[in-house]
Amino acid sequence: MWWRQFLKELRGHRGEILLLVGALLVWTAFLYSRVGVWEPELIVLIYWFPMGFLPLWAIWTSVQLYRQEWRENTSYLMLSLPVRAWTITSAKLAIAAAGILGFSALIFGGAALLTARTGFFARIVDVFEIVPLDWMIKTGLIFYGAMIFGILVVSLISQFAYVFSRLFSRFQGLAMVWTWFLTIWLMGEAAWFGHRFLGWMPDLRLQAYYVMNNVPGTHSVAIETGPILAVALFLAGLYWVLNVTVERAVEV
């Protein structure tokens, strides 16, 4: 049932996906044609601009995923089959995750193509004499995972804000906006709670590299785990509330 729900969501948004993929391919082809005309640094820098639209895409898609359910009046039918609310919500989050992973993979692939074509990689190869390649890969994966997680958090909050707004018969748009900002504020309060009361938890340690007076060095960076755990628990609770709200909004 979950897989069928996931495929249903995917088919419902295939036009949007193809449009975005096409736009990214055109953007890559355009910058590829500028090789030898523009500076390599400029080409590589502005190529990453589409990454800034991923959070906006996550917000827009999260709202559209649920708006389609109410427009086609299919939520009540699915829940009456019965299909648990978590099946619906997890499939929609999976669509957002798949879209983010797919688009970011295409962007990284295009970046590798342009970097090789412009010869930009040869200009920064000296960096690997200071920073080990395995550390760069590990750190890059950590930051990439954090980026994906952050965008999924935005998607989850946006989905909850839209579904919660359906509980109101009037001013649904205003209710959605206020719910979105209130949830962000509460998540910040959860992080403060973790910092205040879970500070006894061991910190995460990451190794960082730096260069001072042409001499490379390393130092350890400590990351508090208390706020991370508190935010994770808050998001788990928010997901549970989302499932409850889906069933309640459909009954309304």
Image: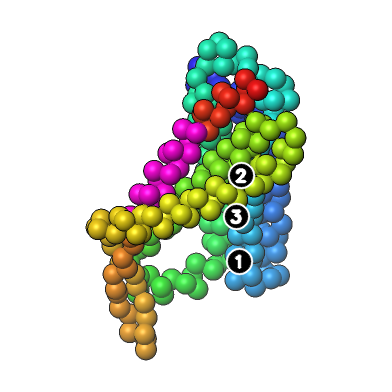
* Number of on-image labels: 3
Can you identify the residue that label 1 sits on? 45
Image coordinates of residue 42 in percent, x first then y, are: 64, 70
Report the mark closest to the observer, 2 or 1. 2
SS at mark 2 in the image: helix
Q: Which of the 4 quarters of the picture holds residue 36?
A: bottom right
- Is 72 inside the magenta-drawn segment? no
- Magenta stretch: give its range: 226-241
Hey, what amino acid is under mark 3? Met
The residue at 40%/45% (across/down) is: 232
N-terminal of the pair, mark 2 or mark 3, is: 3
Can you identify the residue that label 2 sits on? 179
Q: Is residue 172 left or right of residue 159?
A: right
The residue at 52%/44% (across/down) is: 152
The residue at 51%/46% (across/down) is: 153
Hey, what amino acid is under mark 1? Leu
Q: Is residue 48 left or right of residue 203?
A: right
As drawn, the label of residue 51 is 3
Q: Distance between the Cα atoms at labels 2 and 3?
A: 26 Å
- The answer to whether the residues at label 2 and label 3 have Cβ atoms under 8 Å apart is no
